[in-house]
Image: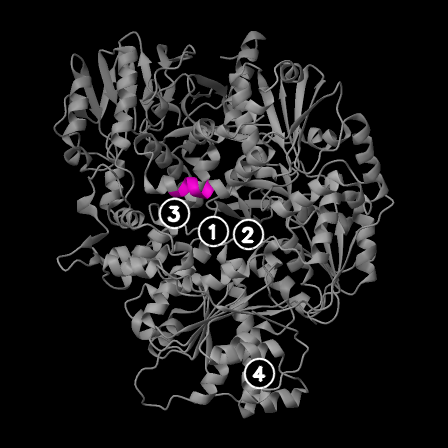
Amino acid sequence: MHRLAHTLSAPATAPLLHAQTTINSVAAICDPLGGLYLPETGTLVVSDLHLEKGSAFARRGMLLPPYDTLATLRVLEAAIARHNPKLVISLGDNFHDRVGSAVMPDAFRHMIAAMALGREWIWINGNHDPDGAFGLPGASMDELNHAGLVFRHEPKRGEAIGEIAGHLHPAATVVRREKAVRRACFATDGTRMLMPAFGVTTGGLDLRHRAMTGLFDRNKLVAHMLGRDRIYSVRFANLIA
Amino acid sequence: MNRIDSREPQGDALTLPAPFLRWFGEKGWQPRAHQLELLARTEAGESTLLIAPTGAGKTLAGFLPSLVDLTHRGKVPPGSAFVGIHTLYISPLKALAVDIERNLMKPVGEMGLPVRIENRTGDTPTAKRQRQKLNPPDILLTTPEQLALLLANGEASRFFKDLRYVIFDELHSLVTSKRGHLLSLGLARLRRLAPGLQTIGLSATVADPMDLQRWLASQEPDARNHAGLVQVQGGAKPKISILKTEEHVPWAGHSARYAIPDVYAAIKEHGTTLLFVNTRSQAELLFQELWTNNDDNLPIALHHGSLDVAQRRKVEAAMAENRLRAVVATSTLDLGIDWGDVDLVVHVGAPKGASRLAQRIGRANHRMDEPSKAILVPANRFEVMECQAALDANYVGAQDTPPVGKGALDVLAQHVLGMACAAPFNPLDLYAEITSASPYAALAWETFERVVDFVATGGYALKTYERYARIRKTKDGLYRVSNPLVAQQYRLNVGTIVESPMLNVRMVKRNQRGSLGRGGMALGKVEEYFLEMLSQGDTFMFSGKVLRFEGIRENECLVSQAFSFDPKVPSYAGGKFPLSTYLAQQVRKMLADPARRAPLPEQVRDWLSLQKDVSMLPREDELLIETFPRGSKHYMVIYAFEGRLAHQTLGMLLTRRLDRAGLKPLGFVATDYSLAVWALDDLGTTFELRRGALAELFDEDMLGDDLEAWLNESFLLKRTFRNCAVIAGLIDQRHPGKEKTGRQVTVSADLIYDVLHAHEPDHLLLEATRNDAATGLLDIARLGDMLKRIKGHITHRRLDRISPLAVPVMLEIGKEMIQGEAQDFLLSEAADDLILEAMGGLDVE
């Protein structure tokens, strides 16, 4: 209910706690809404929106609620309003499947158009939506090099320096007093950054999972976990006390 | 209603056909009066409920009408037209269906009856299932889930057209759950396919037999029909005692460790002992403690629902052959599987319900006329009172089984889809059929329409899924499934038992190179959430062994033998019943009435009289609240006696209200008997200064907005939602070809809940979820009754230190933390580590 709460209620009165970090010496701010803001270039990065996930399931016989696209876009609106970026990069799996961007209702198309007004927008292609985004503002591409960083959907092994990637939906589990709490997180060792999934119906994959091995220097790895109004930053080694 | 003494001879035993009389004669037995009564009533065309204690020959009684009728009919000559099944027997357990087949075949064989009996469970091979459809047996033994599958088949009408009798075994345990709801809908359909069928219900003693009698009969808009009743009074009264011990009975806790030597001595004195506990962790602990004390190497075994099936079967077989001296068991053994001779039942921990105790004690001794023997072992002082209350209840035959309850909407959704899979349906006809089932008799037409809409397109206000509809109304006004895949999906996901995410536990060895081997022994299943908090090398107790956690591979939890007697992580919870309303009331009476306290052991009486001196013992209708300071905090203890679930809900709501009143509550802990809340502000002084403050705090209106607000963030509600979503078919547990792991279901169900709740809070599934929570995990109904009861009867005692009665709940503090609210606290604690590290100048880079 964390990020979703922002789409429904007035902003909380408590001051927001972002986490500041650097990737390949580029300053970055981890926002509790799930976006990464790069102040030097005015860039907002989001990843794995998985828009139209509900309808993708409905097409296959599972009638999940048709509200996920709206909910995700509302969170995105809030993030854009907060940072007023010059450039928005959506890091792939923007839609849950190939036909998603074609079948999306017009109302949502208009929402995106309004958000993109007055700024640049890049759709990075993901494995769920390799063909690009149809009928939407901005450009589709597989990879982008920009201001000392490289933006792509799937992290590439052996090419960690300055990489911002998504795809794996990183989540971290904190264990204290025999209780476990799991949250989506930004994962970075200062060299590479894995983005949390932004879509409201996306699940997470634990940092300890096999698929994550070899991506980070675990001694330097910090999980910036998404809380209601703040980021909780925990070193990988301290996740389990 | 006839009440019949089972030993009274009956004159018209001659209604039995010759092979039966001969068989009884050869055995030197007499048909029992209730067996003949049930036969006579059934032959007169009545549906009947038989209530009888274990060992009364209930099963034979249930089958007698069917066997007699089949004997009169004789074998179906070869070459006749298709004949459907004659009798359907439904049991809650697969194992029971198999057990009954064995027990029934014996007399049928000995009498040489022309009857074919077969069972059909999830384990029945496909070839046999196919054959059963083409050439059905006379009597089919099966489970509720298999019945639902048979009914969703296109050939159901042919298969069931000749059905005469439907026998429901252990009906008392079936009807109160969602399985019972699904089964009642199945019965309604059977009645339509075979209008002449009669029902026979077999049940243990229940609080309200009429509930079950109605369940067995077809309900009409203007008539509440019910089946007849044949009730057999219990045989000899059981001999129950509370463990007499020289040891000190602890204030709190559930381990009953103090009693182990006495329990072991009791096992030694008896041939075979069944030891019942309430949770799996208690079972593990008791088992380990007994073996530590097992100087004589007695064969003592362990049996609970998480253990591997093969292991459980081994224990069951050894038990039936009388090779064991004792078995430690949880509720898995509550039901009527034949366990051979049991001489003693030991109940460790309080039984939590009078009927549950009676049914468990019934496991001892299958010969009805001999008294069963049982010892109750309370684990703490409140449990001593609870055990005494249960013992008194057993003596007077009081019952506290739960009522049948209103039919769940998620179950109805599943059934509607199943009926569409069987054949196109007319909504008016289906509505009439559904409301003939007693749990759904009061279902409104509008609700039914919403359910059909949900099944078709998800039932969303935003109508975007019309083109993906699973069922569609065609021109003839009938609903039919849109494509064959829908039926395939339905068949894979039928049933109401939603498995919590579990992983197999497999024992492995390390080889010389230190890597883990493959293919060790499977020990059972454990909840995934429990494993999430383990790191490699942690030790925990499972299956009676101390195990070392090695890691997770695919969907298995790998463990190795740990050479330690002191597991790091004690164990995991699971299967905890709340205290029944009836027993709670009895315990309150005991506190109020000195005469009722007389039978209690001296140390417990001393404890209570000390309480009377320093504070007070509340009257039965009075709610006692004590406040006292301790350390830097102020405590409030509420003696509500409404069970842990209702107390937890109350605790959540009270802390919200205290917070709003600016009293800075910090936390709470709940037991079955009381609730402790602590705060930074002086609660006692506040309540004393402002009269009416307490009454306001406990006003019923907390069940309005406060409850609503809390529910919206409650993690408990999400767990309930997940079950409803799976049962209703919104989320599939299984897809053709691949099985979704429980974990995946959990993650997505939580997120779906959030989205749905945010955008359509009145959705049908959320309504079903709230209904479930009210009676289940949150026990709101019971809390509401309590708030009504205590209105104007709150007594506040302001003390300067802790009272004797408060000690048990105070000892629980720190052992439990509440999910949800506490989560962010844990996270900030972990994040603070990083800050501390930074402040301490440690190398963070």
Chain of the residue that carries numbered disc 1 in the rendered image: B
Nearest to the observer: residue B775 or residue A137? B775
Image coordinates for residue B467, horizontal then vertical, percent:
17, 46
What type is the residue that disc 2 sits on?
A: Pro
Left or right for B710, reference A37: right
Q: Earlier in the sequence, mark 3 or mark 4?
A: 4
- Label for residue B726? 3
Q: Nearer the viewer, residue B166 or B843?
A: B166
User: Majority secondary structure of the magenta segment?
Assistant: helix
For the image, the number of numbered tags is 4
Q: Amino acid at mark 4?
A: Pro
Q: Earlier in the sequence, mark 3 or mark 1?
A: 1
Q: Which residue is mark 2?
A: B402
Q: Is residue A197 visible?
A: yes
- Chain containing the residue with disc 3: B
Q: Is residue B647 left or right of residue A5?
A: right
Q: Look at the picture and state if B76 lies above or below B185.
A: below
Marks 4 and 2 close (CB-CB < 8 Å): no
Check the residue under mark 2 and report the chain it is in.
B
- Residue wearing tag 1: B405
What is the spatial separation of the Cα atoms under label 3 and label 2, in whole angstroms?
A: 25 Å
